[in-house]
Amino acid sequence: MVAMRALDTSEKAARIQEELHDKLGPEGRIRLAIEMSDLAREFAVAGLRAQRPELTEPELMRELVRVLYGK
């Protein structure tokens, strides 16, 4: 599989990253993608919580959806 390399990643680092991804296998890569997605969502919620501490949990989730997907 040929992956696109980030512009700020060296050839050596890209090679190492590709080797590590290959070692994970398909299931491991999916698991990693899910974990990264969950972490990104946690960061987004934390940011919203810091900006709007008055929001209840349901309001916070609605605001997250609005930020991510628009109105």
Image (cartoon, rainbow, N blue to C red):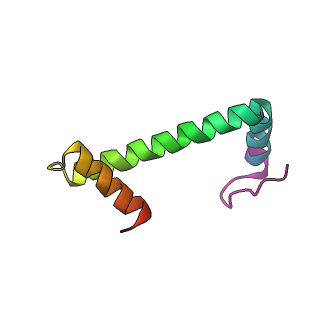
Q: How many marks?
A: 0
**Residue at point 54% right, 41% down?**
36
Question: Quick check: is 8 in the magenta stretch?
Answer: yes
Is 60 contained in the magenta span?
no
Q: Which residue sits at x=85%, y=49%?
A: 1
Residue at 73% x, 41% y: name it: 17
Location of residue 48 with respect to 39 vertically, above or below = below
Question: In the picture provided, is 61 more to the left or to the right than 38?
Answer: left
Q: Main secondary structure of the magenta part?
A: loop
Q: Height in image: 65 above or below 30?
A: below
Estimate the x, y position of residue 25 in percent, counting from the top left: 77, 33
Q: Left of 26 or right of it: where is 65?
A: left
- Image quadrant where residue 65 sits: bottom left
Q: Name the residue furthest left.
A: 54
Between residue 22 and residue 37, name the one nearer to us.
37
Residue 60: x and y in percent read: 27, 50
- Magenta-highlighted residues: 1-13
Residue 70, quarter of picture: bottom left
Query: As rendered, which of 9 and 44 lies closer to the eye?
Result: 44
Quadrant for the C terminus, please: bottom left
